[in-house]
Image (cartoon, rainbow, N blue to C red):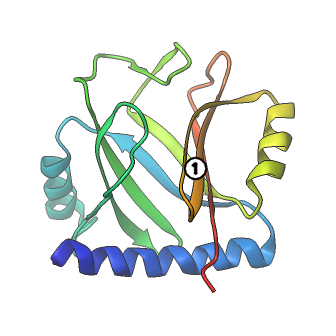
Amino acid sequence: MENQDREVSFESRMMRLVRKCHREKKLIMNHVCIRVEDIGRTERLLAESFGIGAEGFTRVEGNLFKGEALVSGTWVNENFYLELMEPLEKQTIGYDTGCGVPIGHLSEVGFLTPNMDAELERLSKLGWRVTDMLSSEYSREVKMDMEPSIGFPIELMEINLKD
């Protein structure tokens, strides 16, 4: 029940940003995702050490990207959240981005977009390529990176506005 209450609060903040993204018709950087070895321990450590997530992390339920075992997030301020991802397989030094080039613990930098198709077209002309995608009736999420990787993978999220 506690995660459910946090999930409603998390979604409420997210939808405020989604409305802003659609209203201003521009990308909004809204999160950074870090790969961790033990998500529960990391959540506790961040809360105890820095106050990040002191009110609790929200665990993502449902579909995850390939290679993800657990994902959680907590708002750092009104416009930005920290996301943690525990991979299915134990990490090694230099983590795989999906492009065959190892990087550190950064999983992605996330952006909301009001128009996924237009953004994919624009970014592909700049050399970005799709490495993974998820979709539902409510949203589309796409992970992208350069080939070869520049060590800055991104995630685009287009979330439909609810009437």
Q: Nearer the viewer, residue 133 or 23?
A: 133
Could you tell whether 78 is left or right of 76 in the image?
right
The residue shown at (14%, 57%) is: 44
**Neighbour tally class for label 1: few under 14, some 14-19, many 20 plus, Cα within 10 Å:** many
Q: Quadrant of the C terminus?
A: bottom right
Q: Amino acid at mark 1?
A: Glu
In this rendering, the answer to whether 29 lies above or below 162 is above
The residue shown at (19%, 63%) is: 47
Q: Quadrant of residue 36?
A: top left
Could you tell whether 60 is left or right of 154 in the image?
left
In this rendering, the answer to whether 40 lies above or below 163 is above
Q: Which percent across, then down, holds residue 115?
A: 77, 59
Which element carries disc 1, helix, strand or loop? Answer: strand
Q: Which percent across, then down, holds residue 12?
A: 46, 81
Q: Nearer the viewer, residue 70 or 150?
A: 70
Q: Quadrant of the N terminus?
A: bottom left
Q: Residue furthest bottom?
A: 163
Q: Which residue is mark 1?
A: 141
Q: Which percent across, then down, holds residue 65?
A: 43, 39
Q: Quadrant of residue 24?
A: bottom right
